[in-house]
Amino acid sequence: MRKKRFNVTGLCVPDKHYMVDISGKLAQIRELMDDEHYFTINRARQYGKTTTLLALERALNDEYVVASISFEGLGDESFESPEVFCGAFLRLIQRALSRAPTGDESVSKWGNTEVRDFESLSLHITEMCKDKRLVLLIDEVDKTSNNRVFLNFLSMLRTKYLARNGGKDYTFHSVILAGVYDIKAIKLKIMREEAGSMVREEVKTYNSPWNIAVDFDVDMSFSAPEIATMLADYENDHHTGMDITAVSEEIRRFTSGYPFLVSRVCQYIDEKMGAGNWTVSGVRTAVKKITFLKNLLFDDIFKNMENDRKVYDFMYNLLIVGNIRRVSKYDPVVELCSMYGFITIDSGGTAHISNMIFENVMVDYFISIKHRTTEDSKQVRNSMYEEISGGETFDMELCLRKFAEHYAEIYTERDIAFYERHGRLMFLSYLKPLVNGHGNFYIESQFTDERRMDVVVDFRGQQFIIELKLWRGEKAQENAYRQLLGYMNSKDLNEGYLLTFDLRKGENRESKTEWVETQNGDATKRIFEVVV
């Protein structure tokens, strides 16, 4: 019997790969299909769409005839005209149904009929669906969705759907379109003549014929109990003795259930770290390692930010500046960041980074750009590395004192706008080379009215919590103390660190480096407060 493994490339297959039990999600999707709905599964790349469609196809074969096809590999030439598209579409359908376990020869031969336009295709679909519950699944649908011929195809499906509901036609029982982009807002490529030559331009349309689709609200991220089903399967084979619940919850904490990231963490522990590392600490080590390894998902993150300055600025403001709170889902930049899987939007309309791994990867990216343009990292490495973190322990108090001195040397009131936007990045850039090698830091953003950012540093078994914030008055500072104490309690730590950037001008501006003791129940807590 072939040994199963964790898979992060392409389709996951149950008898070859360790997989999360998604039967609960499939049941929710099937409810939509049983009710004859048409809908779109649009999620970020490597979010398990193709694997879900395969599992769904297998689950539906007991009741439905399923035609599962993909537009991946269809070139622009397939969309040059209705005749070419209809022929290509029917060939895909015919190949799909020839593999379907239907036992109906007429189904397997579908596609042999010649069609020249959408009218004849529509008639053909009517004949095929008269006495069958035929379900159409199309993967990678956005590969060629920016084309008027494709819009005409959707329009045909819409017309038949409405006629079917009125008792005047037969058509697909249910249709699922899967891809990254939202088909409801397609960019059309339209040819126009300019100076004697044809020019292709993109025009965005909001009146997509796919407005018949119902909302797809199934949560496709993996919960901790769902992750536990995959780990239980692995544990049954390998007997590592892991605490499945604790490890599942830690994986969920870092990945927020993003399918690729869940499998990547597990794969790294299994293939690079060994059986003894299926622990909470092992998960943290794996997260640290994979953050610095290239993969196609991370490549997409950087490509999308580099190719669109508005996306770059949005993520920088969210992660570093902290001045983005409530957003509109109809904002095109918010739509893009959500579609890429960068952010989630809560019920109050506030944007949050989608998971801690993305947060770490993006912050490292911003730090790297800063390092290319400043000498801060060299100064830290050359003058203070041995003193602060060269031994077995990390001296966080000294780290913050040295940063305060460095900040005071370079601070000028004429650059206040710069410090408000980049001050926290300066500290993270300062911290990174000190921690690298023997530790890691990650960010837990808590951008409320006080614009807080919690930085958690792990170094050789030590853990530090540093709260970064902008000065917003005495009341906000008191709230910051309470919030930091609450976070310290949740981590069972007696010491914490508060770094505040005071950007007031003149005599009102304050500088401070001191330990403050406070009683928290029966325990005495210490906070090292630094105001720069």
Image (spheres, rainbow, N blue to C red):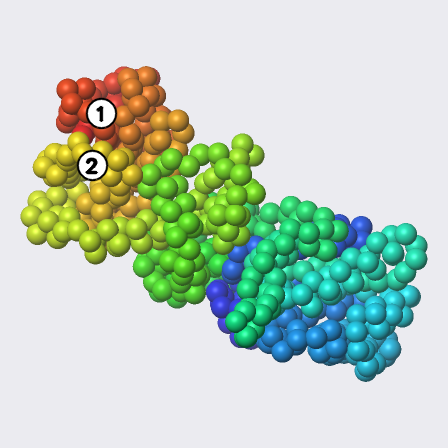
Residue depicted at 47% across the width and 39% down the height: 351
User: Count the marks: how many?
Assistant: 2
Secondary structure under tag 2 reads: helix
Residue that mark 1 sits on = 504
Q: Position of residue 377 (x, y in %)?
A: 16, 51
Secondary structure under tag 1 reads: loop
Q: Quick one: label 1 or label 2, which is nearer the N terminus? A: 2
Please identify the quarter of the rendering in which residue 491 is found. top left
Q: Nearer the viewer, residue 197 or 498?
A: 197
At label 1, which amino acid type do we have? Arg
Q: Nearer the viewer, residue 211 or 21?
A: 211
Q: Position of residue 303 (x, y in %)?
A: 40, 61
Q: Is residue 404 above or below residue 279?
A: above
> Which quadrant is home to the N terminus?
bottom right
Which residue appears farthest toward the front when viewing the image? 195
Q: Is residue 233 above or below residue 488?
A: below
Residue depicted at 47% across the width and 62% down the height: 238
Residue depicted at 49% across the width and 68% down the height: 9
Residue that mark 2 sits on = 415
Label 2: how many residues lie within 10 Å, few (<14), some (14-19) or many (20+)?
Answer: few
Q: Is residue 303 above or below residue 405?
A: below
Please identify the quarter of the rendering in which residue 130 is found. bottom right
